[in-house]
Structure formats: structure tokens, C-alpha cells
Image (cartoon, helix red, strand yellow):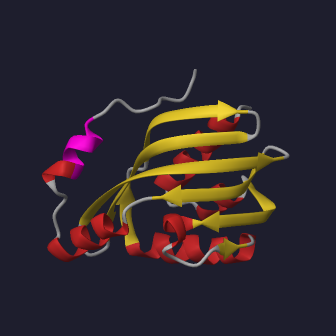
């Protein structure tokens, strides 16, 4: 399985809000640097499980999508959007870029970079801006096969 196939499997699990499905593909020494340093690092699988369970409890649905990627050795670079509808009915769409480092076929390190202002303003104003909408109208990377 390619690293991109692994990521697609994770994405499919997250679309179902299946925390166990995501966790199955994370290395035991997993580290997540979310939001480009705005939030504390999530260090270890137990901390990641707690973070995912908290996120899942707040979501009605999500449509995480990838627009582009590059895979070299055990590193996968990606560009996409994390789009979701919260239990409060508010739609949020956050364009992002990320880097995944794999070890033994599972994700060891996950780094994401996005503009937190975009996320915060959408939650407060309860609308996705036309500038963000324009970024989202792109073909997605499909799973091979």
C-alpha cells in the first residue's frame, strides 16, 4: 500500500467519524503538530485519540478533501481543505497544507499549516467567505482503482 493509499483509508474513516479507523494507521510514537504551531503538539496515540474523540463529538459531518500531493520515500506532502458542519449547523472550510512522515507503513509525524483566522472568522460569522469558496472549487485527488 502506498502512503497515499494509507491517507485515503484514514480520510474514509474520518468521513465516518471512525476514530478507531484513523488510529489504526498511526505509529505508536505518533506526533501531530496541528495549526502550524498555534496549538500545542499532540504527542502520542492516547493524546491523539482524545483529540479525535473531542473533534468527532462536535461534528455533524465532514468533507476532508485533497487537491494535490507529492510522495517521496516515507514523506507525503498534501494540500487540501478540512470542511465540516458542526453540531451547531455552522459550516467551516479551512484550506491547508500538510506533511506526513511514515515509519513502518504508519504515520509517525503529522504537521499541518493553515490560517487559524479563516477558521475562527467562519465560526463567528457563520459563513465561508467567497475567497475561500474560490479555493475549494478544484478537482480532488481520487483513490486509485
Residue 38, image x and y in percent?
48, 74
**The magenta stretch spans which residues?**
132-137
Placement of 12 over or under 73, stated as above or below: below
In percent of the image, x 71 and y 74: which residue is there?
A: 43
Kindly give the residue lying farthest to the top in the view shown. Answer: 145
In percent of the image, x 37 and y 68: which residue is there?
A: 116
Residue 91, image x and y in percent?
25, 62
Question: Can you see residue 63?
Answer: yes
Q: Quadrant of the C terminus?
A: top right
Membership of 63 in magenta stretch: no
Instruction: Label the magenta part by its dominant secondary structure.
Output: helix
In percent of the image, x 31 and y 73: which residue is there?
A: 87
Placement of 69 over or under 56, stated as above or below: above
Q: Which of these two is toward me, 66 or 15?
A: 66
Q: Which of these two is toward me, 97 or 24?
A: 97
Placement of 111 over or under 46, stated as above or below: above
Amino acid at each position: 500500500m502506498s502512503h497515499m493509499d494509507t491517507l485515503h483509508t484514514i480520510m474514509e474513516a474520518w468521513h465516518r467519524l471512525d476514530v478507531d479507523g484513523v488510529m489504526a494507521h498511526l505509529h505508536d510514537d505518533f506526533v501531530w503538530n496541528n495549526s502550524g504551531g498555534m496549538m500545542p503538539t499532540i504527542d502520542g496515540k492516547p493524546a491523539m485519540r482524545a483529540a479525535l474523540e473531542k473533534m468527532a463529538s462536535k461534528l455533524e459531518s465532514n468533507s476532508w478533501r485533497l487537491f494535490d500531493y507529492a510522495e517521496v520515500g516515507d514523506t507525503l506532502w498534501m494540500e487540501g481543505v478540512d470542511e465540516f458542519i458542526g453540531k451547531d449547523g455552522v459550516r467551516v472550510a479551512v484550506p491547508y497544507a500538510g506533511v506526513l512522515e511514515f515509519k513502518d507503513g504508519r504515520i509517525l509525524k503529522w504537521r499541518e499549516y493553515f490560517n487559524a483566522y479563516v477558521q475562527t472568522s467562519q465560526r463567528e460569522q457563520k459563513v465561508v467567505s467567497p475567497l475561500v469558496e474560490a479555493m475549494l472549487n478544484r478537482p480532488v485527488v481520487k483513490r486509485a482503482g
